[in-house]
Every structure is written in structure tokens, then in C-alpha cells.
Image: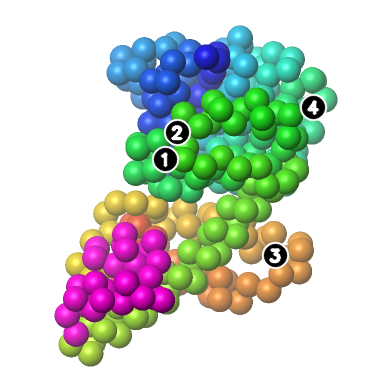
Amino acid sequence: MAQCAFIGLGIMGYPMAGHLQAKGHQVAVYNRTAAKARQWVEQHGGRHAETPRQAAEGAEFVMLCVGNDDDIRSVAYGDDGALAGLAEGAVLVDHTTASADIARELEAKAKATGKAFIDAPVSGGQAGAENGVLTVMCGGESASFERAQPVIQAYARAVTLLGPAGAGQLTKMVNQICIAGLVQGLSEAIAFGLKAGLDMDQVIGVISKGAAQSWQMENRAPTMIKGKFDFGFPAVWMRKDLKICLEEADRNGALLPITALIDQFYHEVVDAGGARWDTSSLITRLTRKG
Ligand code: NAP
């Protein structure tokens, strides 16, 4: 069992840290809003730290799960940052969905002082975090990955090393590009079927047994048909992720014409008041009245 720290107890981090403690690891938690960290300790045990540095002190593995690149900088760097508290030989694991650049930057800073780094964005959403069945896409050196993998396994069903630092984030970008196009296709199909007067629950029941089947169809079509979006992965965060994809494509020369268009569609959804609506709310552009 390992000494761990978990920084960022949001929708994802809170249950992920809980699985670590439940599997017998010793967990120190830090959260910007301290009340959440105190609540976590009341619920799970472990230790509450006042700063990321204090959480990292004495830990063999320090997990981050915050919002974006800037949030990572604010918890990892500086006198009170996690890197300042991290012992030599310890591994910093970043579960934030962020750029590949910040992953490479974190690895360079960690290595300069004898520490290791793994970028490890996740897929599987809130339910995956709560049930401990996330898919974790990792980048970094294999020796550090081999050490961190059994610990990460506490909240994952698959933990895979895909290349050097940044490879986890690049893989998550591929994942988000797939989802963007797929959700738009599903939205158009459902909106078309509704306009055609079909019983779309029945239609989805039939076509989900064939080649049109997807995770989005199985898990999101029923709520898309009902027009329910107050759950899941927020549209505003999908925009954050697509921006990262588009910036990376600018650098590597990949063409993402549909992804760029769908990013604009999400812009419309956010402008219409849907910032916190699930990603499947893309369909509202096609079904709203007037
Ligand atoms: P969330 O509920 O908004 O939580 C964000 C966490 O980061 C909170 O603990 C927040 O602290 C902390 N934080 C944000 N900015 C900070 C800053 N500048 N300094 C210190 N702490 C800061 O987000 P989440 O849904 O858990 O998502 C976390 C990451 O996982 C994101 O990168 C997201 O894209 C990714 N992800 C999310 C999902 C999902 O379904 N939610 C799925 C896959 C991947 P406070 O409590 O003080 O606000």
C-alpha cells in the first residue's frame, strides 16, 4: 500500500481519491475550497492538507485532477505547489484533461529535481469515477508508469502507457475528436427521426443492435430524445477540450474541419444557456422551437 496525495476533489477527483483510500492506500487530500476536503476526510478518513505542497510531502504518488493548464500550474508550481513538496523518486500523476505541452513541461520540471511524471487523462465520466472503472491514457517513462499503474488501478478498469510524456493527453484528444463527430451525427439522426414522426425509442432499440451502435447511442440517445441534459460532461468543458485539439492540430498539421465546426456548435449551445449541459445537448440546436 502506498502513501498518496490527491489534489482537486471535483466531480472526478472526489470519488477517485475515495477509491484510493478504500483500497488501503494512505491518502492526503487538498482542495482549493477547503470545505470539500474536510468533507472528504469525514467520509473516507485520510488527512486534509492546507496546501498542495503539504499534501505532497511524504507521498510516493501525487495525483492531480483540476480543470485546465492554468489550474495545473497553480497547484503544481510555486512555494506552496505540489512539486515543492514532492520527495525525490516520487511520481506526479496528472489526471486533468490538458495540453500535451503542459505534460512535457511538468515532466521536465519534475525530472530536474529527481522526480517522475505521468500524464494520465481519463475517460468514463462521473459514473466511471464513482464506480472506479475509468479508462486511463498515460504518457511518460515506462519505469515510472510500472510503479504508478497498480495504484491508479484503484479507480480504473484500464490503465495503458501510450508513449512519452504528452502521449496520454494526445490520446485523450483523439478520444474527444471521435466523440464530437459522433454526437453531432447522433443528434442529426435523432432530430431527423423525430421530425419524420418515428417512435425514436423504438428506432434506437432496433438500430443499436446493428452497425450504428455506439456508447453515445446506448447511454445518451434516450435522454436526447427526452431533451434531458442536466447531468454528464458539461458543454463548456467539451469546448475546453476541443480548443486543445484544434491548437494541437495547428501544430501537427492535421485537418479537423468537422471538429472545428462542432466546436462552434458547442459555442452556440453555451450561448443559449447550456454551459453545464451534457455533451449530448448538441441536439438542442436542431430540436429547439422558433
Ligand atoms: P470539477 O468538478 O469542476 O472540479 C475541478 C477541481 O479542480 C475542483 O476540485 C476545483 O477546486 C479544482 N480547481 C480548479 N481550478 C483550480 C485552481 N486554479 N486552483 C486549485 N484548484 C482548482 O471538474 P471535474 O469534472 O472533476 O473534471 C476534472 C478534470 O477531469 C477536467 O480536466 C475535466 O476535463 C476532466 N474530465 C472530466 C470528466 C467529467 O465527466 N466530469 C470526464 C473526463 C475528464 P474547487 O472545488 O475549489 O472549485
**Magenta span:** 198-223
Residue shown at 18% from the left, 87% from the top: 197
Query: What secondary structure predominates along the stretch shown in magenta?
Result: helix
Residue 210 location, x and y as percent? Answer: 36, 75
- Dividing the picture into quadrants, the one containing residue 73 is top right
Residue that numbered label 3 is attached to: 249
Real-space CA distance between mark 4 and mark 2, rounded to the nearest whole angstrom: 26 Å
Q: Tag 1 or tag 2, which sits nearer the N-term? A: 1
Element under disc 2: helix
Residue that numbered label 1 is attached to: 133
Residue that numbered label 2 is attached to: 155
Amino acid under label 3? Ala
Real-space CA distance between mark 4 and mark 1, rounded to the nearest whole angstrom: 30 Å
Residue shown at 76% from the left, 62% from the top: 251
Q: Tag 3 or tag 4, which sits nearer the N-term? A: 4
Element under disc 3: helix
Element under disc 4: helix
Amino acid under label 1? Val
Residue shown at 48% from the left, 16% from the top: 25
Q: Tag 2 or tag 3, which sits nearer the N-term? A: 2
User: Few, some or many C-alpha atoms within 10 Å of disc 2 (few <14, some 14-19, many ≥20)?
Assistant: many
